[in-house]
Image (tube, rainbow, N blue to C red):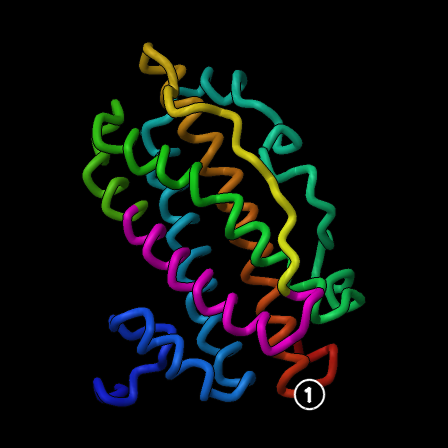
Amino acid sequence: MLEKKSLPCLLRPAPVVYLVAMCRAVPVNDLLDRASQRSDKMHSLSTLLTQEMDSHFPPYGRMQMPRPADCHTSALQTPNDKEQALQVSESDLMSLARSLLQAWVDPLAVLSTSAITLPHPSKSSISSKIQELQEHSKSLADGLDILSGKMGPSAQAISFLPYTGGTDLGQDRVTILNKFNFLLSCLRRDSHKIDSFLKVLRCRAAKLQPELC
């Protein structure tokens, strides 16, 4: 295990100014490796959350769920798989990952607030995981801000993807669970994209062959 003094800058709790100065001195390869750890944790948490929700989600509720194309981030053109991601420039992949992270700031806040009174037997566990997701998302976004600064203007560009779903998920149990579950399904999809993009970037930085990415 890593000693406390050697914890990576993106994973260590510390004042923001101190973290920024420390991270700027770390090589890009190391920063990408640590960012990938964060994104992997985010995707794992979003997967656990959807599984937890599914355990008590009414079967008829699934029939009412919107399509993935209705996710608020669907307007962003992204690679569909690793093969396509390998054809995208490093700067564009970084821009896409940062755009998706930024797009989830408000929806994650809605999920966090709604989880407190969620009509679900595991609401306490769900609420705790969402808070953890928020922390990982914020830390990862801060880290990618630093990384993008090392990669040039294209990597620093962010596409604006407003969340227009509002803060009220509804009044009745099925509607609330339906909207909550839909947001989680969108989050799981996007966290997988972020994780995939960062892993491709890490692979390229390490100069690995494409088939090893």
Q: Residue at image x 65%, y 75%?
A: 151
Q: Residue at image x 55%, y 83%?
A: 28
**33 above or below 158?**
below
SS class, disc 1:
loop
Q: Name the image quarter holding the C terminus.
A: bottom right
Give left or right: position of 124 versus 39: left
How far from the left and from the top, in percent, is residue 155? Answer: 66, 66
Majority SS type along the magenta span: helix
Q: Residue furthest right?
A: 87
Q: Name the image quarter holding the N terminus.
A: bottom left
Q: Quadrant of residue 205?
A: bottom right
Give left or right: position of 136 versus 94: left
> Magenta segment: does it hold 146?
yes
How far from the left and from the top, in percent, is residue 123? Answer: 23, 34
> Magenta segment: does it hold 11?
no
Give left or right: position of 202 versus 8: right
**158 above or below 163?**
below
How far from the left and from the top, in percent, is residue 120? Answer: 25, 27
Q: Residue furthest top?
A: 172
The magenta stretch is: 131-155
Camera-side residue: 105 or 74? Answer: 105
Camera-side residue: 4 or 155? Answer: 155
- Residue type at the position of mark 1: Lys
**132 above or below 34?**
above
How far from the left and from the top, in percent, is residue 187? Answer: 49, 43
Can you identify the residue that label 1 sits on?
Answer: 207
Badge 1: residue crowd in 10 Å (few <14, some 14–19, many ≥20): few
Q: Residue at image x 55%, y 54%?
A: 192
